[in-house]
Image: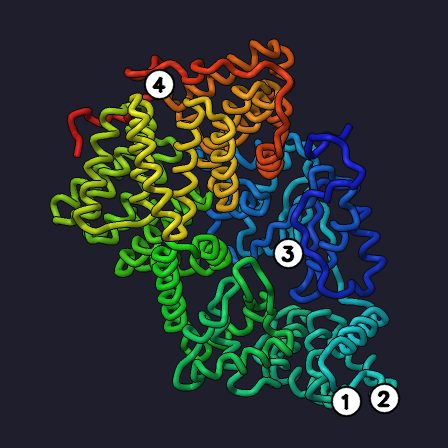
Amino acid sequence: MRRPFRSGPPSAVPAPAPGNLPAELNRFVGRADELAALTRHLGESRLVTVVGVGGVGKTRLALKAADALKKRYCDGIWLVELSALRDPELLEHALVEALGLTDHSSRPTSRVLAGHLATRQLLLVIDGFEQLIDACATLVRELLLRAPELRVLAVGRRPLRVDGELTFSLAPMKETDAIRLFTERAAAASPGPRPADAGPAAVPELCRRLDGIPLALELAAGRLHVLSVEQILDRVGDRFRVLTAGRRGAPPRHQTLRTAIGWSHELCTPAERLLWARLSVFAGPFDLEAAEYVCGGPELPDEEVLDVLAELISQSLVIREETPAGTRYRMLDTVRAYGAEWLEALEDTDRMRRRHRDWYMGLATWYELDWFSARQSDVAAGTESALPNLRAALELCLESPEEAHLGQHLAGTLWFYWAGCGRLTEGRHWLVRALSLDTPYDESRLKALWVLGYVAVLQGDSTAAVGALHECREEAARTGNALARAYAVHRLGCHALLTDDMPRAERLLRSALDTYRELGELNSNVLMGQVELAMSLIFQDDLEAAVALCVEVREICEDSGERWARAYALYVLAYAAWTRDAHAEARALATESITIHHGFNDLVGLVLAVELLALVTASEGDPAEAAVLQGAASRLWESVGPKLFGSGFFGAPRALCERRASEALGTERYAACQGEGLGLSISAAVERALAERRPAAGPPHQPGASRPARKTRRPAGSPTRGGEAAGRDA
């Protein structure tokens, strides 16, 4: 029996199938026999790997087959593209990203994946794994063992060689299909000679000479605005002979593909060839400004890059895409690989990699500054788009001990992305790698230390957090870096807040804020310090001072356009409104906080706001809906870390909500409602939380009974402060 993907009221309009398969940009041509065989194999084996030469159409066939089977998988079909990935340690992160998961905890990512997939009936399409074959094979085997309903469709140039794997070898297209593909793509190309204008034997001969490889056929069709079919056919013969020389022993099909790509390269102008080679340093999508900076120079002035790029796009060598971050460009992997070989032949690879690294370090620095502005959402989308290139820049920095400080600077500069956009686990990966290299305690290392401490605090890892933050504070004091010391003290205060030492949290946070004020520092971190101080005051019953702090934060955010810190301030103001029994106000503030956090994919802020909304809902007299929201929050905590950070103070509202809802509903119904919430995805939980509420049928909550019992001591069983000495304050 298939498990439903989502719960909720039935609708006359079927919900869209879950998954992330891309829409087709042009019509799928031919391959009817192969498509039927592949779909049949997917019904027979839990792991099918499509193998074949680059450019033969493996990915396109796999996606078509997957789309045809989408009704079989109630939990969807999910595509994981690995071609831009080089570090095996990031493989699990790539799968987490593709599945739309966010995990802030310190659990192994493989366990997160296995837990998510364990009870789901879905098809995972893994594309471009060749450079990670050992790690990918190990991970696929583990996931198949732990998730009995999971099926995997892998796409690569060689099998994974995992037990139970069925290998599907994809040959070049049959002549009839190849002719249809070439003809259709030619008809869609820019104005120029058409295949119908050629002699009757020219097109079949061209398709045969290109061995029916789809990529070669599409590249040929892209040249018809310049050459006739006969002219292309004449040039193919020459380029075959030239480009196969010196590659003795290579498989014939590899020679054919290389010939097709090389022939297209030879037809380019010198400027187009040069830009092609230089663009190969990009590991993922890039924008025009990046291309102009990285690829421009005396031989190719940056003001000419746009025109040359346009020619490469017209020849299908570069693809233009519209993304949430704006217009981006990318190269097919095979085309990019050929350009990289050409760049190596020019002995210019190292210089171009450094220029690429410098651009993305500058971009990260600019984004960090822009995070404290009305462009915050644009920064989040831009950083997401740039992530493959930022990874490549980090890799280059960490290849050489002499440049490790640059890697520390870049990993630290991206704090806003790691902490604000749901990337804690990957951020910690890069920070730990960067700090493992021996460097002086300069500004870059100190920044990486406090950012690592911040990330570890949010993950609930007290030992790592306190170790990094103490090291940063002591070395900053020794070297006279007052700002780095303030950030370390700030995050130690945050750690004290989450481990229930409210007086210490207040002292540390006030000390950090005083230093920020003295140094003229004002950004999202500083505003978060005010919000965290407000939280510590609320838990010490100083509600008036806490509200004043958050009102000030909200006003600054309104002036600057900042939204991320604003969402946390709204959470505190919502809590304060709830304590006054102003339930409508509390709901409005909490739902706005949820909306902002969900937009940034900040699960820490999101789950806190959902927990508070559950309490507000119970106070409004709707215990069933409150229980559903608590169940949804419980599922979110699985990806964040210890529930409510293991804090008695943060946990008291949840305990109050649970007590009220279970008393009103009874144990059995409360458990059923909570189970409904546990079945909601993140998006479904947010949709449920933001749904317009009707007045509850039950009696309203009695005024004056809102607030949970005050806690002035550490609750029994709550975590210690990771060995931090109580006397080591600011």
Residue 608 spot, x, y in % from top left = 45, 31
Q: Identity of the amino acid at label 3? A: Gly
**Quick check: 678 left or right of 655?**
right
**Helix, strand or loop under label 3:** strand
Mark 4 or mark 2: which comes first in sequence? 2
**Quarter of image, res 292:** bottom left
**Helix, strand or loop under label 2:** loop
Residue at the spot of label 3: 156
**Quarter of image, res 227:** bottom right
CB within 8 Å, label 4 to label 2: no
CB within 8 Å, label 3 to label 4: no
Q: Identity of the amino acid at label 2? A: Gly
Residue 112 spot, x, y in % from top left = 53, 35
Residue 665 seen in render: yes
Residue at the spot of label 4: 718
Q: Identity of the amino acid at label 1? A: Glu
Q: Residue at x 33, y 53 (%)?
A: 413
Mark 1 or mark 2: which comes first in sequence? 2
CB within 8 Å, label 1 to label 3: no
Residue at the spot of label 1: 230
Mark 4 or mark 1: which comes first in sequence? 1
Q: CA distance from mark 4 to mark 1?
A: 79 Å
CB within 8 Å, label 4 to label 1: no
* 426 vs 85, nearest the viewer: 426
**Helix, strand or loop under label 4:** loop
Q: CA distance from mark 2 to mark 3?
A: 37 Å
Q: Residue at x 79, y 50 (%)?
A: 68
Q: Which mark is residue 187?
A: none
Q: Identity of the amino acid at label 4? A: Ser
